[in-house]
Every structure is written in C-alpha cells, then in structure tokens.
Amino acid sequence: MTEFSWPVRVYYEDTDAGGVVYYANYLKYLERARTEFLRKLGIEQDELEKKENIIFAVRSMTIDYLKPAFFNELLHVSAAVSELRKASVCFHQVISNHRKEALCKAQVKIACINSKNLKPEPIPEFITKEFGNDA
C-alpha cells in the first residue's frame, strides 16, 4: 500500500532542557499522521463515532528510537497499512528528518471498538475498501 506522509514541526514544548524531543512526544506525532491519513481517505473520526458508534484505539505498539529529533526541525511522519484484519489494522510508521534519516520506527496495532459497549467490532466495509484503495 502507498505510504502517507505528514509534516510535523518540533516546538520548544516538545523538547527537554537540551532541545531534544522528549520520547513520549513521538507518540503524538505518530497519532497525528494516522489521523491525517484517515482524513485524507475521507474518514473523520468524530463523524465515525457519531454515525457508526465506532472509535479506534491503540491496542499495542512496538517502537524503536533510532536517532534524536531537535527543536525546530521539520519532521516527516509516515503511515502505511501493513496488515488489515476483521477488527484491527496495523500501521507501519516512520519519523524521519529533513535528511530522510529514520529517527523512529513503529508498528501500531489499532483496534476498532464500539463506542457504546467498548467491545471490538468489525471495521466497516467502507473503511476497509479505502485502505485497499491506498492513500
């Protein structure tokens, strides 16, 4: 599948006293890219919850921190569907700098959840079709 990329600027609030991005902020960058990936496909998560009672929740994540990112850098955060299952989707994500050096790599498993009972639910077909059509 095609890889989606989203630019993220590192703000001062994202860094520690040495100007290095605090490790937990990488998770925010990954989340933003997944959200924008869905938006590009025409899937707004707030509308999905209102109309279909569906929410997406991180089920698990494997992350490798390879190199640091610094204050004011422009990063690129990619998101690509690596596995699609009945009630979950896995994303392969990479955060890279302007030199295209990988700073962080992650595998993120997202569960499709019914917002009323918080139990797993099959991903609606209109979404799985979009994943199959690439971003």
Image (cartoon, rainbow, N blue to C red):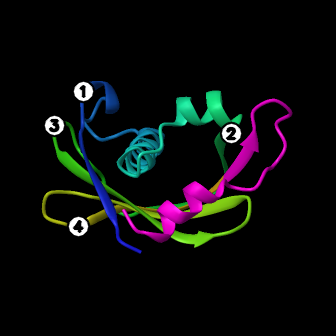
Q: Where is mark 3, residue-wise?
A: 72
The residue wearing badge 4 is: 101
Q: Is 127 colored magenta in this rendering?
A: yes
Q: Is mark 1 on a helix, strand or loop?
A: helix
Q: Position of residue 83 (x, y in %)?
A: 59, 72
Residue 28 appears left or right of 19: right
**CA distance for labels 4 and 2:** 36 Å
Q: Residue at x 62, y 69 (%)?
A: 84
Q: Which quadrant would the C terminus be assigned to in this image?
A: bottom left
Q: In this view, does 87 lie above or below 47?
A: below
Magenta region: which residues?
111-135
Amino acid bearing label 4: Glu
Q: Is residue 112 left or right of residue 15?
A: right
Label 3 is placed on what type of residue?
A: Asn
Give the labeled residue for mark 1: 12
Of badges 2 and 1, nearer the viewer stands: 2
**Corner quadrant of residue 134:** bottom left
Amino acid type assigned to the residue bearing label 2 in the image: Ile
Q: Do the residues labelled 2 and 3 touch (CB within 8 Å)?
A: no
- The span from disc 3 to disc 1 (Cα, nearest Å) is 7 Å
Whichever of callouts 2 and 1 sits on the residue coming sooner in the sequence is: 1
Quadrant (top left/top right/bottom left/bottom right) for the N terminus: bottom left
Q: Looking at numbered disc 1 in the image, what kind of residue is underneath it?
A: Tyr
Q: Position of residue 47 (x, y in %)?
A: 54, 31
